[in-house]
Image (spheres, grey):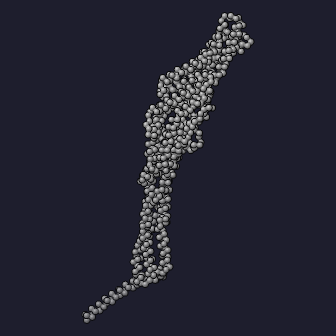
Amino acid sequence: MARRFENLVSARKSLKISLEKSKALGFALDKTGPRLEEIIQRLPSLEAAVRPIRAQKEALVAVGGHIDRAVGPAAAVLKVFDAVHGLERSLFSDPRSDLSGYLSVLRRLEEALKFLGDNCGLAIQWLEDIVEYLEDNSVADEKYLSNLKNSLKTLRELQTDEERDRLDGGLLYAALEKLEAEFRRLLMEFSVPLPMSSATGEQACIAPSPLPVHVIQKLQAIIERLTANNRLDNCISIYVEVRSANVRASLQALNLDYLEISISEFNDVQSIEGYIAQWGKHLEFAVKHLFEAEYRLCSDVFEKIGLDIWMSCFAKIAAQAGILAFLQFGKMVTESKKDPIKLLKLLDIFYSLNKLRLDFNRLFGGKACIEIQNLTRDLIKRVIEGACEIFWELLVQVELQRQAPPPPDGCVPRLVSFITDYSNRLLGDDYRPILTQVLVIERSWKQEKFQERLLNDAILNIVKAIELNLETWSKGYQDITLSYIFMMNNHWHFYKHLKGTKLGDLLGDVWLREHEQYKEYYAAVYLRETWGKLPALLSREGLIMFSGGRATARDLVKKRLKAFNEAFDEMYKKQLNWVISEKDLREKTCHLAVQAIVPVYRSYMQNYGPLVEQDASSSKYAKYTAQSLEKMLSSLFQPKTGKFGSFKSRQYSSFNGKSNDAVKSPLLRSSSTLV
């Protein structure tokens, strides 16, 4: 009985367990129903997706491994590509607001694109292997395989160099364009023309870097990214364009229109000598202020790129901003007609270039500035050769003028006044050191040694040639008394204008005193042979005792006054157009003439004038009063305005010229007479 009871209990437990399992299975079936419904709904699409695959079960099992190997790289590429597009919003924004953040995002884009560039090819290769396997094993139909092949071909084309930048849909290109625009904006915003107030200062100071440090740092950061993407040339082009325009704007305030003058627009150096003086100051300002600043700025901005790059950048800025125009203007001066004044201007140009020699060597010494170097060397060579040629030809040109006729009025020839002033300038503190340096260089080119006495000897020989010219010219006067005026004029000119000068010191006191004595000699001879002869015509002989009676005395007085008047009128008329250039010599000569005649005439008229003054024809004989004679004599030898006189009104006047019979030479071609 007990055994049956146990069996019943055991059966009860078993039934209870079975009921619980059935209940759990019922719950499970309830949950599985919707999933089966979902599977049933997806079956048509799954059937459509696998329809192109028509292989046997064994082939499908084998292709699984190929698919797994290809899907991994392809999925990684797609993930990165999605990340790239996630950067679009940041890269299409304006870099100005947060340049460092923009550059950081750009670097992420570059890294992503590098990954794509390195792995797209691998993923495509794996996919191509799958297609090849599918085709070889007839796993899919031909249409399906054809579509796969076309897609892979398109991907492969995008891998070529010229199409690679399209992998990101142009995002990198657009970002780099924005960076270039920001680079230009920063430069233009902070590139301000240098104030010209310092252009006229006595001391030329070096201009500070024209861009703030934080701007330079931004430019450097942009250059780094552009260089990494092969856009350095674009960056340099923008920099050169903006900075050279800025330098030109600074120079515009200096009014440099004269740099555009062509060789055909002027006749000689005198017409542009004022521009040459400006040229030296403007060139110094441009080099020490503008190009010095650009040199330093190029170094600061492009220092991380390398010396050759920033030197090339600076060379382009200097060339485009105007340094070549300065050098071309100097060359144009060297190509102008030979002229003694040109020598002084060539020395001015040499002085300006020599003063900037160290600056030129430092700024333009690199191989990138080879054009500037060649033009500078050529200009210096032309300046030295041109200056030396003119200097050594001066003696020959002075000697050639000896064949010209003397000045018809007896004044100081233009050649004489010019040469004395000109020689003093060459020997002065301003030009002698420069001329000496030029001659030393010229001699060294000929492998000859320059000696200081060569310069002195050359000047002394020119003065000796002038003296010989004067002797020759004095003999060309038909009226010997005019030759006395001529020699008196020139000897006094030498003494007065050379005493206490560099040329006078070179010639010496003895030489100067000789010319003073020669002046006194010719003045005395002139007076004796001209006005000194007239008092003898007013002789008192036969009039003292009225031995022949009053009528006879009156006739003698009339006769002698007539002879005096005729001689005076003839002499006065002849000398009316003669000139004594120097005022002090002119006044002294007139005073001596007055003293030689007027006292004698006054005394004569006081004593014997009454004999003729009562005569009806008295005005014929008593033609002059003592006062009128003095006035007439005092008015002699006046220089003609604008024609005669010293050349000091034009310090650098050329003695190039031609007179009626003057010999023309390559160096002497002015239109005015020299003698």
Relative to 532, is 217 above or below?
A: below
Specify the farthest residue to the right: 616
Between 269 and 31, the one nearer to me in the picture: 269
Between 155 and 29, the one nearer to me in the picture: 155
Relative to 149, is 299 above or below?
A: above
| Residue drawn at (46%, 56%) of the image | 232
Quadrant for the N terminus in the image: bottom left
Quadrant for the C terminus in the image: top right
Where is residue 584 shown, x and y percent of the image? 56, 22
Specify the farthest residue to the left: 2
Q: Please say whether residue 147 is visible from this viewpoint.
A: yes
| Residue drawn at (49%, 71%) of the image | 154
Where is residue 348 shown, x and y percent of the image? 50, 37
Q: Is residue 577 left or right of residue 74?
A: right
Q: Is residue 34 left or right of residue 658?
A: left
Where is residue 634 shown, x and y percent of the image? 62, 19
Specify the farthest residue to the bottom: 1
Between 515 and 155, the one nearer to me in the picture: 515
Number of numbered discs overlaid on the protein picture: 0
Between 37 and 642, the one nearer to me in the picture: 642
Q: Please say whether residue 103 is visible from this viewpoint.
A: no
| Residue drawn at (44%, 36%) of the image | 450
Dividing the picture into quadrants, the one containing residue 7 is bottom left
Dividing the picture into quadrants, the one containing residue 647 is top right
| Residue drawn at (61%, 22%) of the image | 480
Where is residue 79 shown, x and y percent of the image? 43, 69
